[in-house]
Image (cartoon, rainbow, N blue to C red):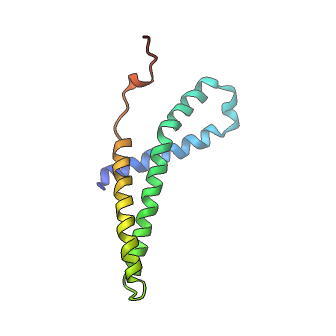
Amino acid sequence: MQAGLLARLERMTGRCRELSRELSSPELSGDSVRYARLSQEYAQLAPLAETYSAWQRLGREIDELTAMQRDAELREMAEADLRSSRQRRQALEDELRALLVPRDPLDSAGVFL
């Protein structure tokens, strides 16, 4: 994945953690407007943060499996798992790219029929 996308994902994941801390803060209980705004932002960023975390975990797993390939006894098992892990990581990368597409601000507006 490109460095620019990784940096953007890191920023967005950091913002998600920050929002989580803010939402659990007792000072926020009296400000319902701010709570609603932060909750909405958190709801938009949480799926991206979770997917990015899974993508990172798979990257570490792929590194471990690559190291296991050096062991003759574990090579065959590691190769099968490595193929599967790479496919799952590619699927997560595709999902991340879709989650990074900016949302239309009008999507959250009410519609009258």
Residue plotted at (44% across, 68% down): 61
Quarter in which the C terminus is drawn: top left
Residue plotted at (43% across, 15% down): 111
Q: Residue 76, how many percent across, how many down? A: 38, 81
Q: Does residue 53 appear to the left or right of 82 in the view shown?
A: right
- Quick check: 49 above or below 72? above
Q: Residue 5, how many percent across, how many down? A: 33, 49
* Picture quadrant where residue 77 is located: bottom left
Numbered disc total: 0
Q: Does residue 49 appear to the left or right of 19 in the view shown?
A: left
Quarter in which the N terminus is drawn: bottom left
Residue furthest to the bottom: 72
- Quick check: 77 above or below 112? below
Using the image as rendered, state which of residue 69 and residue 6 is in the foreground: 69
Residue plotted at (48% across, 44% down): 47
Q: Residue 23, how many percent across, how many down? A: 62, 37
Using the image as rendered, state which of residue 10 and residue 49 is in the foreground: 49
Q: Does residue 61 appear to the left or right of 30 in the view shown?
A: left
Residue furthest to the top: 113
Using the image as rendered, state which of residue 39 and residue 86 is in the foreground: 86
- Quick check: 68 above or below 38? below
Q: Residue 63, how many percent across, how many down? A: 40, 72
- Quick check: 65 above or below 31? below
* Picture quadrant where residue 105 is located: top left
Residue furthest to the left: 2
